[in-house]
């Protein structure tokens, strides 16, 4: 629908604003569009490309494709998505109340193992003091499960798959000095 909406990506300038360079923003091009958007973020980032795929939609001129779509505002791993508001409450309130520290000393990094399996790294600042990683992991998963029945099921899936690794290192700071609660990285 290139004639109704434009997809805008911030590029390398996005980093200075705390956005991934491939974040997706939508803007309406026509007043008659069903919804009017002006740089609306869906909280997703992706690689945007034009290519031929041989599908029937291509005959209508639809050659724009999105790939490697990921959320930078929600935590999604192994097909399970948790709302950022719930995760932020756990990172900024519940973990510091239980284990010490302050907001900004806990961070989640969505990643993949080199073989492509999903992984969630829970970074815990070393300045908080000695902690048992297994206890922190279990507390985090129990807190994730507390929001709803669906969250309980998703947290159980993460627990069984062993997705959450606790690492004692400072959270990653963006170039603008901000610490994002949820971050995406590549294989590690």
Image (cartoon, rainbow, N blue to C red):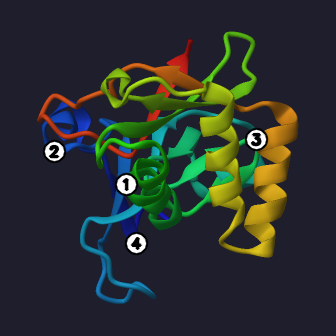
> In the image, what residue occupies the spot 30% across and 35% down?
21
Q: Is residue 10 left or right of residue 177?
A: right
| Disc with the residue nearer the chain's start (3 vs 2) | 2
| Residue that badge 1 annotates | 92
| Outermost residue, right side | 160
Say what secondary structure mark 1 lies in.
Answer: helix
Per the rendering, the mark at residue 17 is 2
Quadrant in the picture for the C terminus: top right
Are circles 3 and 2 on residues that touch, CB within 8 Å?
A: no
Residue 43 in sight in this render: no
> What's the distance in space between the residues labelled 4 and 2, CA to CA?
27 Å
| Disc with the residue nearer the chain's start (1 vs 4) | 4
Say what secondary structure mark 2 lies in.
Answer: helix
Observer-side mark, 1 or 4, equals 1
Name the spot of residue 182 as percent of width and height, x first: 43, 44
Name the spot of residue 179 as percent of width and height, x first: 26, 39
Packing grade of label 1 (10 A; few <14, some 14-19, many >=20) is some
| Residue that badge 4 annotates | 4
Packing grade of label 2 (10 A; few <14, some 14-19, many >=20) is some
| Disc with the residue nearer the chain's start (4 vs 2) | 4
Q: Nearer the viewer, residue 53 or 47?
A: 47
């Amino acid at each position: 629908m290139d004639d109704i909406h434009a997809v805008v990506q911030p590029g390398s300038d996005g980093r200075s604003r705390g956005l991934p360079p491939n974040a997706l923003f939508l803007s309406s091009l026509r007043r008659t569009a069903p919804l009017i958007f002006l740089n609306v973020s869906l909280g997703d980032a992706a690689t945007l490309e034009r290519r031929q795929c041989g599908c029937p939609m291509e005959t209508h001129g639809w050659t724009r494709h999105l790939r490697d779509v990921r959320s930078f505002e929600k935590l999604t791993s192994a097909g399970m998505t948790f709302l950022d508001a719930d995760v932020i409450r756990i990172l900024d309130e519940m973990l510091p109340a239980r284990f010490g520290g302050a907001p900004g000393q806990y961070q989640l990094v969505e990643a993949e193992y080199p073989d492509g399996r999903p992984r969630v790294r829970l970074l815990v600042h070393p300045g908080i003091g000695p902690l048992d990683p297994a206890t922190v992991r279990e507390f985090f998963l129990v807190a994730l499960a507390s929001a709803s029945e669906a969250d309980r099921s998703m947290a159980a899936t993460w627990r069984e798959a062993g997705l959450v690794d606790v690492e004692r290192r400072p959270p990653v700071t963006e170039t603008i000095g901000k610490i994002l609660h949820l971050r995406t990285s590549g294989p590690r």
